[in-house]
C-alpha cells in the first residue's frame, strides 16, 4: 500500500426495503439486520477498506427515495443503485434513479461516474426478477451484480468495482476481506436459497 488514504464519496439509491441500509449496517456493525427501519434523512456511513495498492475511505450516502439530494450527488465519485429481486417494481425504479442523476451532472444519456447496479436477495429460491429481464446495465454500460446482503453473495464486489474505476487501478484487490459478520444459515430460518 502506498501514499495517503483516498477518500471516495458514493451515493446509494433504491426504493424502500431493497437492502441499502442493511448493506451499510453489515459494514458498520458486522451483523445482518432483518427488521426494516427507513432512513430519513440521508445517512452517511464511513467505511475504511485496505486494498493491496491503496487505503480507501468510502463516504457512502444512503439516500431515501424522494429526498432532494442534488448537492450530495453533484460531487460524488460513484453510485450504487439497488433493487430487490423479489419485487419487480424496484427494478423498474432503477432507470428513474439513473435518469434523475443525469441533469445534476449536466448529461443527457450517460453519467460521468461509475455506477453499480445490485439486485439484492439472490438467496431466495423463487426470484421474481429473472436474469434475462435485467438489461438496463447493458444499455447504459454499467456494472451489475446479483447480490445478497443476508448470505454475503458478491457482497464485496460493488465497492471493489467502484474503487478500481475511480482510482484507475484494475489490479486493486482486498488485502483482507472486510469483516461483515457471518453468513446466515437459511435453512435454520425456514428459507432456502439457490
Image (tube, rainbow, N blue to C red):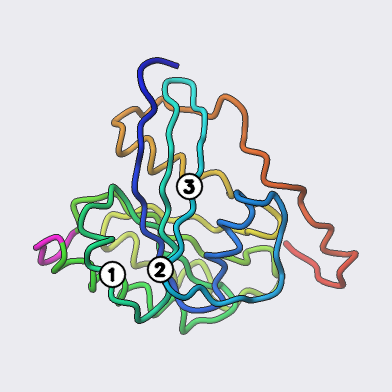
For label 1, the crowd category at 10 Å Cα-Cα, with few meaning under 14, some 14 to 19 and many 20 or more, is: some
- Up the image or down, 99 lies above or below 161; here it is below
For the residue labelled by badge 1, is the local secondary structure a helix, a strand or a loop?
loop
- Up the image or down, 13 lies above or below 144; here it is below
**Could you say where residue 177 lies in the image, as x and y percent from the top left?**
62, 34
Marks 2/1 in contact by CB < 8 Å: the verdict is: yes
For the residue labelled by badge 3, is the local secondary structure a helix, a strand or a loop?
strand
Q: Main secondary structure of the magenta part?
A: loop
Say which quadrant the C terminus sits in. Answer: bottom right
Residue topped by disc 2 = 63
Report the number of numbered marks: 3
Q: Please name the residue shown 23% across and 72% down the image.
A: 99
Q: In screen coordinates, is 146 left or right of 124?
A: left
**Magenta run includes residue 106:** yes
**Could you say where residue 9 lies in the image, as x and y percent from the top left?**
34, 48
Mark before the other along the chain sequence, 3 or 1 = 3
Marks 2/3 in contact by CB < 8 Å: the verdict is: no
Which region is colored magenta? Answer: 105-110
Residue topped by disc 1 = 69
Mark before the other along the chain sequence, 2 or 1 = 2
Task: Return the mark for residue 46.
Answer: 3
In three-dimensional space, the C-alpha distance between marks 3 and 1, rounded to whole angstroms, equals: 18 Å
Amino acid at each position: 500500500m502506498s501514499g495517503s488514504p483516498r477518500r471516495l464519496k458514493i451515493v446509494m439509491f433504491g426504493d424502500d426495503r431493497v437492502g441499502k441500509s442493511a448493506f451499510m449496517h453489515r459494514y458498520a456493525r458486522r451483523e445482518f439486520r432483518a427488521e426494516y427501519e427507513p432512513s430519513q434523512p440521508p445517512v452517511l456511513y464511513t467505511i475504511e477498506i485496505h486494498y493491496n495498492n491503496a487505503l480507501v475511505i468510502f463516504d457512502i450516502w444512503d439516500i431515501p427515495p424522494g429526498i432532494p439530494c442534488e448537492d450530495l450527488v453533484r460531487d460524488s465519485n460513484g453510485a450504487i443503485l439497488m433493487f430487490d429481486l423479489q419485487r419487480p417494481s424496484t427494478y423498474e425504479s432503477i432507470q428513474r434513479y439513473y435518469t434523475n442523476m443525469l441533469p445534476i451532472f449536466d448529461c443527457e444519456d450517460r453519467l460521468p461516474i461509475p455506477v453499480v447496479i445490485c439486485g439484492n436477495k439472490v438467496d431466495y429460491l423463487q426470484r421474481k426478477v429473472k436474469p434475462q429481464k435485467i438489461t438496463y446495465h447493458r444499455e447504459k454500460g454499467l456494472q451489475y451484480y446479483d447480490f445478497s446482503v443476508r448470505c454475503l453473495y458478491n457482497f464485496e464486489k460493488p465497492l471493489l468495482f467502484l474503487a478500481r474505476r475511480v482510482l484507475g487501478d484494475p489490479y486493486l484487490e482486498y488485502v483482507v476481506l472486510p469483516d461483515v459478520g457471518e453468513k446466515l444459515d437459511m435453512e435454520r430460518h425456514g428459507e432456502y436459497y439457490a
